[in-house]
Amino acid sequence: MVLSIFKVLWNNLKQGPSTDPFPFGETFTPARLRGKVAVDPEACVGCGVCATVCAGNAIKHVERGDGSGKDFYVWHNTCTFCGLCQHYCPTDAIRLTNNWSTAHRNEDKYKMKEHEFVAYARCPQCDQAMPNMPHAMLDHIYGAPTEELEAIYKLCPECRRQKAAQQFGAQIHD
Amino acid sequence: MSIIDAIKSKAVRSPWLYRINAGSCNGCDVELATTALIPRYDVERLGCKYCGSPKHADIVLITGPVTSMVKEKVLRVYEEIPDPKVTVAVGVCPISGGVFRGSYSVPIMLDDIIPVDVNVPGCPPRPQAILEGVAMALDIWKTRI
């Protein structure tokens, strides 16, 4: 009975301290921890659903005046790490990393932001600017897209309509 | 002068922390308690210790959006803390208003009324992030004393 405490002490000695060594050493970060938001501008379609669902109003899309694309801002100082943006993003362009290191001086308050430029795509036929259509979006909508879709998904709505009609007409003709 | 320097070098080793809840939901306060009381995070390794009176405090940790009702009280308690002091805003609420920004009772941010030194955003921030912020505040405090 009395000796059991020695057993506990011995086990504690063997285990070493359970105190996290941070800030003097490395700490353990779970892989699925929800931390700072990261944006992949290549995969973003600029639909703005992340800005709509954002609980803390941290996400902002600003259209550029010259029509070349959108500026994508995430202000970490009002982000609550809720993960709604990640959940609703159709192309997994926005995701929460496990980077929890957020402490900063007050001078850097308005520099604590993620800024990405989401460029608009150009139609290969008529060179008109339109929201970028990543392949991930096509997969999301159609599962496995057919060859016909692959041929027209990069075109602007006007050219796509014409091309689709041509393809359809060719099928009927055959 | 050398005596003052000697006292200074001793004094910087043990700043005392004081907590002000400016209308917080208690999420950040739980994390602050975790940082201090659980041996796993143990803020006392940095020489810090929580104190019950603002008159003993060196580093003040403020949580919560500063609501209209609590604003005057926060200022009154803040005035009681002797100089030099370092202010740390914990959580997104005091920094930007967080999810309460634009609400009728949250007209201001903390740094509109109090000079804030360190921000630790998060809802709530991890205990490690709070430790990081306290370590930053310690660096600032050493330059002020």
Image (cartoon, grey):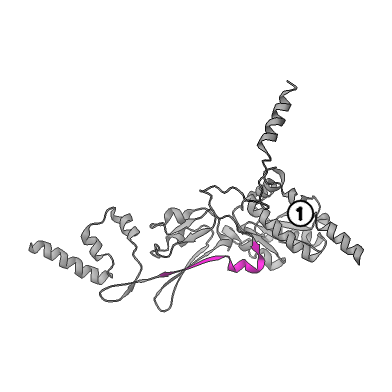
Q: Residues within 10 Å of mark 1 (few under 14, many from 20)?
A: many
Check the image and name the residue furthest to the bottom. Answer: A66
**Which region is colored magenta?**
A104-118
Q: Quadrant of residue A127?
A: bottom left
Measuring from the top left, give residue A146's x and y in whole percent. 23, 57
> In this view, which residue lies farthest toward the top?
A1
**Residue B86 placement (x, y as % from top left):** 75, 62
Residue drawn at point x = 67 percent, y = 63 percent: B110
Q: Is residue B143 left or right of residue A159?
A: right
Give the farthest residue toward the front: A14
Horizontal relation, residue B136 to residue A95: left or right: right
Residue B43 or residue A22, whichever sits in front: A22
Instruction: Please name the residue that numbered disc 1 is placed on.
Output: B18
The amino acid type found where label 1 is placed reads Tyr
Location of residue A17 by image quarter: top right
> From where the camera sits, is residue B23 visible?
no
Give coordinates of residue B3: x percent, y percent.
92, 63
Residue at 83% from the left image edge and 56% from the top image edge? B55
Instruction: Choose between B108 and B85: the one closer to the eye.
Output: B85
Q: Position of residue A15 (x, y in %)?
A: 66, 36
